[in-house]
Amino acid sequence: MTQPSPPDGRHSQPGSGQPAAASAEPGPPRAEPVPPRAEPVSASPRPVPPGAPVPPGAPVPAGARSPAASVAGGTSQLGRLGWASVPVWSLGFLAFAPFLRLAVARRGRKDWAIFAGYLLAVILEIVLVSVAGKSGSMSAAAGGLVIVLMGGGAVHSYLASGGDQARPAVSGPATAERLNREALATARSRMERRREAREIASKDPVLSRELRIGRPDLAREYDDGGLVDVNQVSGEFLQSGLGLSAGEAAAVVAARDTIGRFTSADEVTTYAQLPPDRLDDVRDWMTFS
C-alpha cells in the first residue's frame, strides 16, 4: 500500500516519522531525558551577610547595612565598647573623638553640634587642669569636668553609636537603574549566545550534536542561550522552552511525526495549524536540526 505524500512532496518511512533515506547508519544511543537545566543567571552579586561590609556598588539586601551605616550604627558590640572606652582611658581629653567619627559618618548637623560641644568641653578641661594648682576651686572644677567627660562621654558614645538606623548603600532610583542595566546586559548576552549556537548548528552539525545545542532535555555543559530544537525535544520541553500550551505542543509533535521534520517556524505554524503570529515571539529560541 502506498503512503500518501505530504504537502511538500517529501516522503517519510512508514511508522518511523523520519524522512526516507537510501541508507541510514545507526546513530549514537539516545540519552535518557533528564530534567531541564536551570536557566543561567546573571552574575549577580552574592548576598551580603548581615553585619558584613558591603562592597562598593553591590546591592544591599534587606536588613543589611551600608558602609556608612555600619560605621555609624556600631553593628559590632566590641567596636562600640572600644569607642566608648576612649573618654575613659584618655581621662576625658579625647572625649570628642567618638563623636567626630559619628559626625563624619552620618554628616548630620546634630552630630557635628555634639562633636563641637565635646570639643569645647575638652578645651575647657585642658584650661582648668593647667590652672588647677593655683586655686582649690579650679582644681575641683577640673576634677568634676574630667569625671563628667570620662563617664558621660563613655555612656553617650556607646548609646549614640548604637542608635543609628541602617541606611541603604544607594538610593532607590540608583538601585533600580543598576538592576535595569544588569538585566539588559544579561538579555543581550543570552541573545548573543543563541546567535553563536545557531551559527555552530548551521555550519557544524556534528559539533552541534556534541554540544547538544537546542536539547534542554539532555545533560550538557554548553550554554546555547535557551535554544529549543523543535525536531528533537518532547512536547513537555516545547511547553517549557517555547511557552506553548499543552494542546499546541501536542499539535506540533503530531505534525512532526507526520512530515518527519520541520525546517522553519513557518512550517511549524502551517502543519501544526497554529495562528499565523503564534510563534513570532519565540522564533529566536527555535532551532531545527
Image (tube, grey):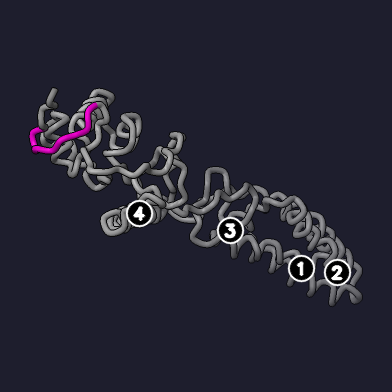
Is 140 inside the magenta-drawn segment?
A: no
Residue 28 visible in this rendered orientation of the protein: yes
- Secondary element at image label 3: helix
- Tag 4 or tag 1, which sits nearer the N-term? 1
Dividing the image into 4 quarters, which one contains the N terminus?
Answer: top left
Disc on res. 67: 3
Please report the residue visible at 10 percent of the width from the left and 31 percent of the height from the top: 5
Disc on res. 206: 4
Residue at image mark 2? 138
- Tag 3 or tag 2, which sits nearer the N-term? 3
Mark 2 to mark 1 CA distance (whole Å) = 21 Å
- Tag 2 or tag 4, which sits nearer the N-term? 2
Residue at image mark 1? 94
Toward the viewer: 180 or 6?
Answer: 6
Mark 3 to mark 1 CA distance (whole Å) = 24 Å
Residue 262 image offset from top left, x and y in percent: 20, 40
Mark 1 to mark 4 CA distance (whole Å) = 76 Å
Q: Which residues are magenta?
A: 6-14
Mark 2 to mark 3 CA distance (whole Å) = 44 Å
Of marks 3 and 1, the one in the foreground: 3
